[in-house]
């Protein structure tokens, strides 16, 4: 006897204020993480950049004032693309 497990419905990438806050405050000299993630089915690939250079979300980085600015995050799967801009403020 086999019970079929329904597949999750296909969905394009989604990012919202909870999964990818549009404004984040970091402290200079601390290890901070760009908080941004995306949902979707199939799971989307997330790429964030600052000034055209890749900047991985979810990975701690030692912070300097140079990290202040706008980060562009793009989530992509077979069903589409979602884009969010995240402004990071660095405080001392």
Image: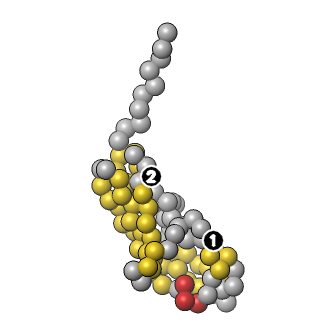
Q: Earlier in the sequence, mark 2 or mark 1?
A: 2
Residue 15 in sight here = no
Furthest-right residue in this view: 30
Mark 2 secondary-structure assignment: strand
Q: Which mark is residue 24?
A: none
The answer to whether residue 54 is left or right of residue 26 is left
Mark 2 vs mark 1: give the one in front: 1
- Examine the rendered structure and indicate whether residue 80 appears above or below residue 56: above
Residue displayed at 61% across by 87% down:
64
The answer to whether residue 88 is left or right of residue 9 is right
The residue that mark 2 highlights is: 39
Indicate the quadrant containing the C terminus: top left, top right, bottom left or bottom right: bottom right
The answer to whether residue 12 is left or right of residue 4 is left
Q: Where is residue 46 in the image (x, y as percent from the top left)?
A: 44, 61
Furthest-front residue in this view: 53
Residue displayed at 62% across by 76% down:
61
Q: Nearer the viewer, residue 85 or 67?
A: 67
Q: Which of 62 and 83 is in front in this view?
A: 62
The residue that mark 1 highlights is: 60
- Examine the rendered structure and indicate whether residue 19 appears above or below residue 31: above
Q: Position of residue 13 (x, y in %)?
A: 38, 54
Mark 1 secondary-structure assignment: loop
Rounded to the nearest whole Å, what is the CA distance between mark 2 and mark 1? 21 Å
Mark 2 surroundings: few (<14), some (14-19) or many (≥20) residues within 10 A: many
């Amino acid at each position: 006897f086999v019970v079929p497990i329904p597949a999750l419905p296909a969905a394009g990438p989604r990012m919202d204020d909870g999964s990818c806050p549009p404004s984040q405050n970091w402290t200079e000299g601390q290890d901070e993480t760009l908080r941004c993630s995306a949902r979707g089915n199939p799971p989307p690939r997330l790429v964030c950049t600052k000034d055209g250079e890749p900047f991985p979300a979810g990975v701690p980085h030692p912070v300097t004032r140079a990290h202040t600015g706008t980060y562009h995050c793009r989530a992509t799967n077979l069903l589409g693309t979602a884009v969010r801009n995240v402004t990071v403020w660095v405080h001392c």
